[in-house]
Amino acid sequence: MRKTLALGILVLIGLGALIRLRGMDELEAQHVPQPTPTPVASAYDETVETREVTLPAESWYAIQTGIYSTAEAAQEKRDAYAQRGAPGYVNQDGEKWRVYIACYGDKDDAAAVRERLSVNQGVETYLHSWVCPEITLRLTGMVGQLDVVETGLTLMHQAANVLRDNAALLDGGERTLGEARSVVAALDESIRLWQDTAGDRFTRPYPELVEMEMQLAAGWKEKHAALQETESATALSAAMKLQAMALYDESCALRQALME
């Protein structure tokens, strides 16, 4: 029952990812040109199958405060904004480091916030499209295990979207502090349930990709603690933005690793 509940909850926040699984313990991702999406099953089915699923490209619109040639310079800028209560985040982009203070799923929303910062506070920023690449993967293996891996590949990405969007709602007065805390609690429960389910369905040592997913999920513990430490709506909103950017960055990095 607990396993079924775990996958049921995860379906609500978004599924979609793919790997190739051989037997019980060998995991391999393959890039293929033309995918055929397949729904996720919630039951632990031991039937062997092959799937293809595309994780579509996604763009976040980042309010960027600067771009630097060294990580140290970017971190100094980030720290300066953090001291002012803004959630500075450093993203490495090739040989450059960008500093963001907020991200949005809608370009117009980001542009409106950037305009307010310029007019009301005299803060010069830039609008940067932060793109997570599309990837198509093929998966072969037992359905019950593949469901878990597939879910894990999108879990943190969807959590990032939830935090990002609810931070904006909190800023706009469309979420109360209590409601935003409930959102964070629901994400924590979903991630913990996924970890428990993955631990049940795979044996150690985990396949390489499962290990990558487990490490990504394990990092949520520290992020969740930071979110819980906040005492006001303003502080929680800033923390949600910061952790959303970190989760998105990590999720995109995982996709990049699978494409290499």
Image: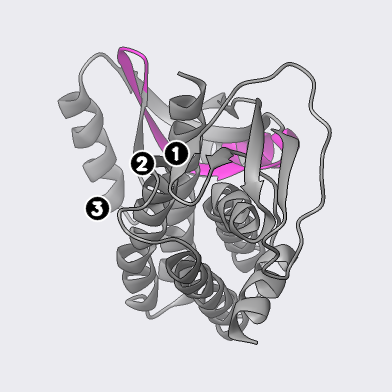
User: Is the residue 200 above or below the residue 73 in the image?
Assistant: below
The structure residue drawn at horizontal position 61% and vertical position 35%, both measured from the top left corner, is: 60
Instruction: Classify mark 1: residues with Cα within 10 Å, few (<14), some (14-19) or many (20+).
Output: many
Could you say which quadrant of the image residue 144 lies in?
bottom right
Question: What residue span does the magenta drawing correspond to?
Answer: 93-115
Q: Earlier in the sequence, mark 2 or mark 3?
A: 3
Label disc, if present, on residue 25 of the rendered structure: none
Q: Position of residue 172 (x, y in %)?
A: 66, 63
Q: Position of residue 260 (x, y in %)?
A: 45, 18
The structure residue drawn at horizontal position 62% and vertical position 46%, both measured from the top left corner, is: 141
Secondary-structure class at tag 2: strand
Q: Taking 28 as reference, is 113 left or right? A: right
Give the residue number, with chain letter if any, for mark 2: 89
Label disc, if present, on residue 83 of the rendered structure: 3
Q: Earlier in the sequence, mark 1 or mark 3?
A: 3
User: Is the residue 116 above or below the residue 6 in the image?
Assistant: above
The structure residue drawn at horizontal position 70% and vertical position 47%, both measured from the top left corner, is: 16
Q: Position of residue 200 (x, y in %)?
A: 47, 71
The count of marks equals 3
Q: Position of residue 229 (x, y in %)?
A: 32, 77
User: Is the residue 215 above or below the residue 138 in the image?
Assistant: below
Could you say which quadrant of the image residue 100 lies in?
top left
Residue type for callout 3: Gln
Label disc, if present, on residue 249 of the rendered structure: 1
Instruction: Classify mark 3: residues with Cα within 10 Å, few (<14), some (14-19) or many (20+).
Output: few
Q: Are marks 2 and 1 in contact (CB under 8 Å)?
A: yes
Q: Is residue 108 magenta?
A: yes
